Amino acid sequence: GAAELGPYRHYMQKEIFEQARALGDTLEGITNIMPELFGDKAYRVFKEIDNVLILACGTSYYAGMTAKYWIESIAKIPVNVEIASEYRYRDSVPNPKSLVVTISQSGETADTLAALKHARELGMLHSLTICNVSTSAMVRECELAYITRAGVEVGVASTKAFTTQLAALFLLALTLAQSKDRLCEAQEQDHIKALRHLPVAITAVLALEPQIIAWADEFARKENALFLGRGLHYPIALEGALKLKEISYIHAEAYPAGELKHGPLALVTKEMPVVTVAPNDTLIEKLKSNMQEVRARGGELYVFADADSRITPSEGVHVIRLPEHYGMLSPILHTVPLQLLAYHTALARGTDVDKPRNLAKSVTVE
Ligand code: G6P
C-alpha cells in the first residue's frame, strides 16, 4: 500500500532506489575472499571444477552473460551461459568437471529448476545458485548457494535483484580465481575495496534521475529504440532494452555495437533513438566510431558515459555522464540509468509499471 511506498509512486521506483541498501546488505561483512561464503563444501568443489555452466532466464540470464566476462577474465576458467529453457531441450556435451551455476531471483522458475535437474542427470553433480530467496526450491536443490539480500522484489521488472546478482557473481569470479591461485593479495584487496564502494557509487548515479527524466519525455513518443554496448556492457545494453520493452511497450533491441553494420544500421533514421552504454574502457575508441556510423545516418544518440569517457554533446548526441569511472564493476553502475530511463518512459506513457501486461513476476510453469 501507500505507506510501504513512502515517497515513491511505484514499487519499481522504490526498488531502484533501494539498490544502495541492497548491495550493502548483499556484501555485508565481506572483507576477504573465502570459498566458505558459498557453502561448507565450496573449498573442495572449487578445487575440483575446471569450467562453469551458467543456467538462467530473463534478466538473470543477462547477469550470467556479464559473469562470463568476469570469470574468464579474472579466474581464467571457461564459462558457458545458457538460457535454461533451451539448454534443457537440446543435446549438449556434459562435462563432469563443470560447476553448474543457476541464477534466479525467485528460486522457483520452472525452466531453471528443470535445467538444473537435466544437468544433474547428465552427470554434472556440482551446483551453485545465486538466489534471492533462501527458502526456495533452487537453494534446496543446489549443493552451494550465495543468497543475495535484495529483499522482497514486487515490481515484475527486476531491478535490485539484478544488481545484487551481479555483485554476488563478481564475488564468485574472485573466489574462483583464488581457488585456482590466480589472485594475489593486493588484487584481492583492490577488488574488495571497489565492491565495498558500490553503495556510495550507486547513490551518486541515482542522483542523475532529473537528467534522465528529460530524456524519458523524448522516448515516450518513440515506438522503437536501439541499445548498444560492447564487451562487459553488451549484456547491460540487453538488460536496458528488456526493461524498456517490458514496461513501456516500446520495441527495443540491443546489439553489440560492432554488429551494427551487419543489420541494425538499416533501421537507423532520425526517428530511431540509439542508447549507448559508453564507459571509458578498452573499447571506447571502437565504440566512438560505431557512434559515428549512427550519426551519419541521422540517428539520435543518447549516451551514458563515465566521468572520463571524453564524449562531448553535439547536435544529435546527448550525453549523461556517470560521476566516476568504475573499472570492472562498471556494468553494475551503468544498469541504473537504464532502469530509470525505462521507468520514467513508462510513467510518461501511463502504463502499469509494476504489473506490465502479459508478464508474471515468477514463471513457475513451463
Ligand atoms: C520473469 C520475471 C523476470 C525474471 C525472470 C527470471 O520473467 O518477470 O524479471 O528475470 O522471470 O526469474 P528468476 O526468478 O528465475 O530470476
Image (cartoon, helix red, strand yellow):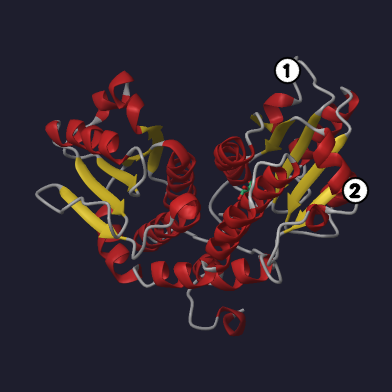
Q: Is residue 196 left or right of residue 39?
A: left
Question: Distance of mark 1 from mark 2, alpha carbons?
Answer: 30 Å
Residue at image position (27%, 66%) is 211
Q: Amino acid at mark 1?
A: Arg
Closer to viewer: mark 1 or mark 2: 2
- Give the secondary structure at mark 1: loop
Residue at image position (28%, 22%) is 261
Residue at image position (87%, 22%) is 122
- Residue density around tag 1, few if under 14, some if 14–19, many if 20 or more, within 10 Å: few
Q: Nearer the viewer, residue 72 or 335?
A: 72
- Please indicate, yes or no, whether residue 247 appears anywhere in the rendered image: no
- Give the secondary structure at mark 2: loop
Residue ID for mark 1: 90
The numbered dot on residue 6 is: none
**Where does residue 34 sit, x and y in percent of width and height?**
77, 56
Number of numbered discs: 2
Residue ID for mark 2: 41
**Where does residue 200 sit, x and y in percent of width and height?**
48, 73
Residue found farthest to the left: 315
Quadrant the C terminus occupies: top right
